[in-house]
Every structure is written in structure tokens, then in C-alpha cells.
Amino acid sequence: MPFPTPAQLEDVLRPLIRQFGLELEQLKITKAGAKSAVRIAVDGEARPDLDALEELSKEISRTFDDAEDESTLNFGPGYTLEVTTPGLDFPLSLPRHWKRNVGRLVKLPQSGQARVLMVDEDGVVLLTKKKKKKSVSAYGFGEVEGAVVEVEFNTAPTDEAQLIGLDRHAYESLIAQAAEENK
């Protein structure tokens, strides 16, 4: 029996991970004989702490061992199991990724840096800066695909921090005002 495919492992992992209130974000398999590795990235509405990751890792390991004993999975001579959360370089692709990062800087693939001001079911509202001029704009999730969180060691400037977490109507007013100024 060959090393399990990603689809086989996802079938086993998804229900187990959901029991912990988490979602499977990424599954990466590296096949290299005794040095094979299964890397699992999980996340949820609330980021799991190290204790939760340890418990989940133990449960996944037990589940994989049981599946090998039952001959439903075969990892070969050995493998390394790594259970983690997505890193900073993990693209923001789902609304929950964006919600967790309200107030933070993100790097947009097409247009540089922006601060996440608000997230709702329609998309994100971002504060961008071009040539020292700041502007507020709304984007659909597809328009900001591939954005990643930027490491920021300082708190947001006061003028930016005051714009974080307003309601949608307030942002629409700011966007309309900026459009009028640019005419």
C-alpha cells in the first residue's frame, strides 16, 4: 500500500480537527522514505494555543496509528507529524483570516501595503497610503487575494487607529468623500 494521498488524509483529518473547533487550512506531504513528513496547518475563529495543538497532534497521531494497525493507511518506515497554525506568510483567503487581522497591516500583491479597517460578508475595507495621501477603499475578497500580514513592531498611528472598527456606513461616507475630492 503506498503512502496516503492528501485526499485520503483529508477524509480522516477534517472530522477529527472539527471536533477541536478548528478547520484544516493546509496539508503538506513530503515523501522521503523514513524522513517523510506530514505537515498539518489548522486554524479557527480563535487561534489555537500550544496546548490545543499538542492535544490535537496526539489525537491525530493516535488516529493515524490506529489506521495503520487496521491497514487502512500506510506511512511506510516512519514519518514526522507536524501540527501547526498557518504562519505570517500564509495568504489571507477566507473572511475569518481577515477578521482576525482587523487593525493590522497587510501586503497586497498588486498595490503595496494597507491597514485592515473592517471586514464583513461583502469584503474588506482597507486604508492605503500613496505619496503620503491616505485613502479608504472597499474591496471584495477576490480583489485582495494573496494578501499576507505584515510584521509591525509599533502600534498603528493615532489617525489610522481611529478609523479601525467603524460601521460600514461610516466607511461608505469616507469613500464617497474621497471620490468627491478626487474629481
Image (spheres, rainbow, N blue to C red):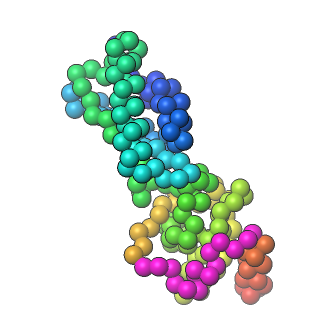
Judging depth in this view, the residue of 70 and 94 nearest the camera is: 70
Residue 28, above or below 91: above
The verdict on residue 52 being magenta is no
In the image, taking residue 90 as reference, residue 132 lies left or right, namely right
Location of residue 73 in the rendering, given as x and y in whole percent from the top left corner: 38, 18
Q: Quadrant of the C terminus?
A: bottom right
Please state, as top left, top right, bottom left or bottom right, where the N terminus lies in the image: top left
Residue 2: quarter of image? top left
Count of numbered marks: 0
| Side of 70 where 119 appears, left or right | right
Residue 170, x across and y down, in percent: 75, 76
Q: Give x and y (percent) for residue 174.
A: 73, 80
Query: Image quadrant of residue 179?
Result: bottom right
Closest to the observer, 117 or 61? 61
Q: Is residue 56 at least partly visible in the picture?
A: yes
Looking at the image, residue 116 lies above or below residue 29: below
On the question of residue 10 being in view, the answer is no
Q: Residue at x 69, y 68 (%)?
A: 138
Residue situated in front as seen by the camera: 111 or 137: 137
Residue 159 lies in the magenta-colored region: yes
Where residue 81 sits in the image (x, y, percent)? 31, 35
Q: In terms of secondary structure, what is the magenta stretch mainly?
A: loop
Residue at left 48%, top 53%?
A: 47
Residue found at x 64% / y 79%: 163
Q: Residue at x 74, y 87 (%)?
A: 181
Report the magenta residues as a range. Answer: 154-168
Q: Is residue 175 above or below residue 8?
A: below
